[in-house]
Image: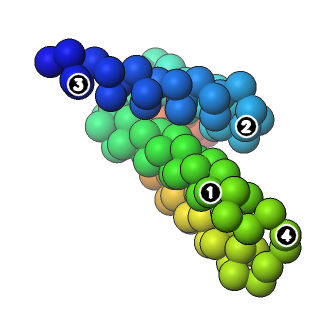
Amino acid sequence: MRRWWRSAGFAWAGVRHAWLTQPNLRIEAWLALLALVLAICLQAPLAPILLCCGLVLGLELINTAVEAVVDLVSPEQHPLARVAKDCAAGAVLVGSAAALLVGVVELLPRLLRLLGL
C-alpha cells in the first residue's frame, strides 16, 4: 500500500505541475466543473459527462508530458518533434470535440426545455 501512495504522490505532482504551468488545463477543468454542475442541475446522466471530462483532462496531461519529453530530447527544432507535439495537441482537440458533442446531445435539449424553447 505504501508503494501505491508513493506512486500516487508522483502522479499528483504531475497534475500539480500541469495545473500551474498549463493554462489550457485550468480552462478545461473549469469547463468540466461547469458541465458537471449543469448536468446535475438539469438531471442529465452524469456518466457520459464525467467520462468526457476525464478524457479531456487526461489527454491534456498526456499532451503536457509529450511536450516536455520532446523539448528534453530535441531542444533544437526538428520536423519530427513538431509532428509529435502537433499530434498530442490534436488528440486533445479530438477529445474536446467529442466531449462538446456529448454535452450538446445530453445537456442542450434539457437546457432548451428548461428555458421553454
Q: Amino acid at mark 3?
A: Trp
Q: Amino acid at mark 1?
A: Val
**Separation of disc 3 and disc 2 at Cα?**
26 Å
Q: Amino acid at mark 2?
A: Gln
Q: Which residue is mark 1?
A: 69
Give the side of residue 81 with respect to residue 5, left or right.
right
Query: Please, what secondary structure does the residue beneath circle 4 have?
Result: loop
Q: Which residue is mark 3?
A: 4
Q: Which quarter of the rendered picture does the N terminus lie within? A: top left
**Separation of disc 4 and disc 2 at Cα?**
22 Å
Q: Residue at x 64, y 72 (%)?
A: 84
**Separation of disc 4 and disc 1 at Cα?**
13 Å
> Of callouts 4 and 3, which one flags the residue occurring earlier in the amino acid sequence?
3
> Of callouts 1 and 2, which one flags the residue occurring earlier in the amino acid sequence?
2
**Label 4 neighbour load within 10 Å: few <14, some 14-19, many 20+:** few
Residue 104 % position (x, y): 53, 49
**Label 2 neighbour load within 10 Å: few <14, some 14-19, many 20+:** some
Query: Please, what secondary structure does the residue beneath circle 3 have?
Result: helix
Q: Is residue 46 above or below residue 97?
A: above
